[in-house]
Each structure stands twice: as structure tokens, then as C-alpha cells.
Image (tube, rainbow, N blue to C red):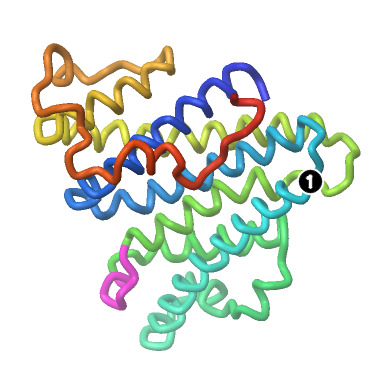
Amino acid sequence: MTDREVTYAKMARQLYRVLTDQRPQWEERSPAAVADFEQLNAYLQAVEEVAAHQGGKGSPEYSNARDQAEHAAEEAAGRLVRGLRTLHSSVPNPAIAKAAGYTPDQLDPLHGPDLLAALNEIAAAADGVRPLLANNGIASEHIDALTDAISLYTPLSEVPSSNQSQGGKLSGTARELTKGLRGVVQRFDQLIDSLREEIPGLAQRYDEARAADANYVQNSTGTGPREGGDGSEGGVGREVAGNAFGPEPQPFQ
């Protein structure tokens, strides 16, 4: 991993701690952001596993991260397939027929590029019939969950199990994971901006953690003196948040 990638991961880890502490506050106002919170933790774990693998600590932990990402993607796809199958049985549609025909027995044996092809096919089919799926209990958030899971699994799936050419492969994986991590952080940037007036203390602590990123531009509404305390009101407590589950990688210490 490059120094810039390591620095960004350290910053994101601090954001995760702030968001863990303040979860009762932001979750009450934006329950949908919980999916991004979980995605943030997943990316941080994956980044740590890549860093550990590059550092010569071995691959078991990295394999676990890849397996977890694969499982999450399959779970998200399974929900969509059930919705597509129900929809197709009611109103046959050639555009979704193949995706609706997948079964767990077909998906479980797939890995790497083969699984990604199936996942992308399911995601594309679901995206094309979003309004119809909504009538069958499959919300846009469920489709987006598969898209996010694919983004996380893609770079992890491309690393070979052997050591051959692994250094270059892992460097590419780190870049892709950092790119995905940035996307999740940027969504939280937007959420915090919307809560600046309501929870100024949370915004202040978020900005303090985010300041480690030289490219971060604080929203203009958050400048100047803030009122409302340090943002700990309603939180789980900094001590608990400091020990929040997530990566604490040696390279980031």
C-alpha cells in the first residue's frame, strides 16, 4: 500500500470510531445510513487484510476477508433473485429470465470471475425492473446493497492464492479498495453536512477526524464557532467507540 492509501485508511478508521460513538444520533435521523456504516467497516477490514498480506503476515486473514465479502454478495444476490423469480412467474420477462433462474446450488460453487459475472447479471436485471420489484417487497436499498457488495468483492476476488505476481495484484487491490472506501466516506460527508445544524458536536468531531485528508473541504455551513457541546450527548461513549470492532493494523499504528 502507498503512504497515501495508508494515511487515508487511518483517517477512515477514526471516522468509524466517531460514527460508532454517535451512532444513536445519526441512525435515528437516517436509518438508511446503517448500510453505509457496515460497508465502511467491511472496507476497512479488507484494506487491513491487504496491508497484512503485503507485510508478509500470511494469507489466512486475507482469505477470511475475501470469504466474508463473497458471502455478503451472495446473500444480497439471493434476496434479489427471489424477487426476480416472483416477478417473472407473474409476468414473464426475457430480460430477467436468466437472473431469475439462479439457485443457491448454482451460485455457491462459483468463485472469482464466474461469481462476479452472475452477480453483475443479477444486479443489472434487478436495476432494470426497480419499480416492479418495489411492488414485491424489494426496495432500491436492496439492489444498491448488491452493487456495494460487488464493489467490495471485485478487487478481493482477483488476488491469486499463490504467491506468483502477488505483489502487483495486491497493489491493484489496495487501489480498488481505497477507491471504494472513498465512496462510502463521501456519502457520510453528505450525511454529516445535512446534520450540522442539528448535531453540531457530531459535525465538529467528524471534521476533526476528516481533517487528516488533505483533499477534504469542510462544508461552509460548518465553519465558525459551534454550539451544542462536544457531540457526546446521546453517544455510546468515546471509550467504547475507541474499541469499536474493526481493523487496528500494524502498518497504520
Q: Nearer the viewer, residue 74 or 218?
A: 218
Specify few, some or many for label 1: CA neighbours under 10 Å numbering under 14, 14-19, or 20 or more. Answer: some
**Quarter that holds the C terminus:** top right
- Where in the figure is residue 198, as x and y percent of width and height? 10, 35
Specify whether 207 is left or right of 88. Answer: left
Q: Is residue 152 above or below residue 253?
A: below
**Residue sitting at x 62%, y 64%:** 118
- Where in the figure is residue 238, as x and y percent of width and height? 34, 36
Q: Nearer the viewer, residue 211 or 132?
A: 211
Residue 137 lies in the magenta stretch: yes
Specify whether 87 is left or right of 24. Answer: right
Q: Which residues are magenta?
A: 132-139
Majority secondary structure of the magenta segment?
loop
Residue 220 lies in the magenta stretch: no
| Residue that label 1 marks | 59
**Residue sitting at x 67%, y 72%:** 108
Q: Nearer the viewer, residue 85 or 143?
A: 143
- Picture quarter containing residue 235? top left
Q: Nearer the viewer, residue 209 or 240?
A: 240
Q: Is residue 152 above or below residue 200?
A: below
Q: What's the residue type where badge 1 is placed? A: Ser
Secondary structure under badge 1?
Answer: loop
Q: Is residue 30 above or below residue 22?
A: below
- Where in the figure is residue 54, as x and y percent of width and height? 76, 32
**Quarter that holds the N terminus:** top right
